[in-house]
Image: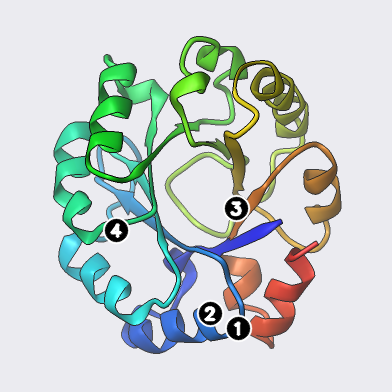
């Protein structure tokens, strides 16, 4: 299990310190949530702040777009060379075209699924993806509780990727902690995004180690 702490839960007054701290504590990726205030009812950060995060990070960036104009935001963040850029299938009319565009920029393309979006949506797309990000909370805010029925969706998604693209990773985001990490690992999750659990823990290193199973 790879661990990608979400900087949405970091102290933005000490962002440089917190990003360096999670990298030193052993995280595998730095998860960056970009929200536009339209696709989700929250507004987070732009390329200036993400550029500062990239400079502080010694681990690759994992950029999650929760926006309406996907192509615009992909082009906005591509110069920072994150390892992954994920966009929401619910907000994209031409997902295959955007997948190809992201890959042409030297970035691994990923698609994010809201809790209500079935994994079958990716039947004809998963072969072209490097990762699928499954939301286990409704996107927009950190600190929400895990939605249990997402586990069944991950099982179906795992079966789909075994058939179509075994190299595609499954990432989970929302309400992840040491209480549910074992079951998530058992159903096929490869990367967990954890915000509140990591940053509110008394020890960043202990929190990340608990998720590294």
Q: Nearer the viewer, mark 4 or mark 1?
A: 1
Q: Which mark is residue 44?
A: 4
Q: CA distance from mark 3 to mark 4?
A: 17 Å
**Helix or strand or loop: what does disc 3 sit on?**
loop
In the image, residue 68 sits, relative to residue 22, either above or below, namely: above
Mark 2 closeness class: few <14, some 14–19, many ≥20 residues within 10 Å: many
Please identify, in this view, whether the residue under mark 2 or under mark 3 is nearer the observer: 2
Q: Nearer the viewer, residue 19 or 145?
A: 19
- For disc 3, the marked residue is 144
Q: SS class of the residue under badge 2? A: helix
Q: Tell me how far mark 4 sits from mark 1, CA to CA.
A: 25 Å
Q: Nearer the viewer, mark 2 or mark 4?
A: 2
| Residue shown at the point (51%, 20%) measured from the top left | 127
> Image height check: is 41 above or below 201?
above
Q: Are marks 1 and 2 in contact (CB under 8 Å)?
A: yes
Q: Between disc 3 and disc 4, whose residue precedes?
A: 4
Mark closer to the chain start, 2 or 3? 2
Q: Earlier in the sequence, mark 1 or mark 3?
A: 1
Residue 22's disc is 2
Res 33 → quadrant: bottom left
Earlier sequence position, callout 4 versus callout 1: 1
- Residue 115 % position (x, y): 58, 30
Residue 49's tag is none
Residue 125 at x, y = what percent? 46, 17
Q: How far apart, in angstroms, are the residues tagged by discs 2 and 3?
A: 21 Å
Expressed as whole percent of the image width and height from the top left, the position of residue 165 reads 60, 24
Neighbourhood count class around disc 1 (C-alpha, 10 Å): few under 14, some 14–19, many 20 upward: some
């Amino acid at each position: 299990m790879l661990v990608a702490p979400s900087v949405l839960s970091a102290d933005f007054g000490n962002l440089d310190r917190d990003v360096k701290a999670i990298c030193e504590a052993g995280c595998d990726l730095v998860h960056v949530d970009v929200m536009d205030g339209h696709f989700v009812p929250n507004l987070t950060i732009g390329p200036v702040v993400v550029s500062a995060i990239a400079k502080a990070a010694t681990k690759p960036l994992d950029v999650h777009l929760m926006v309406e104009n996907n192509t615009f935001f992909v082009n906005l963040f591509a110069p920072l060379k994150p390892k992954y850029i994920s966009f929401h299938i619910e907000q994209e009319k031409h997902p295959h075209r955007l997948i190809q565009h992201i890959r042409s920029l030297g970035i691994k393309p990923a698609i994010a699924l809201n809790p209500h979006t079935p994994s079958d949506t990716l039947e004809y797309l998963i072969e072209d993806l490097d990762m699928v990000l499954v939301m286990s909370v409704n996107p927009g805010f950190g600190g929400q509780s895990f939605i249990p029925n997402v586990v069944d969706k991950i099982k179906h998604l795992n079966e789909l990727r075994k058939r179509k693209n075994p190299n595609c990773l499954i990432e989970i985001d929302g309400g992840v902690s040491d209480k549910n990490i074992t079951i998530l690992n058992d159903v096929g999750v490869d990367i967990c995004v954890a915000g509140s659990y990591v940053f509110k823990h008394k020890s960043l290193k202990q929190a990340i180690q608990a998720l590294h199973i």
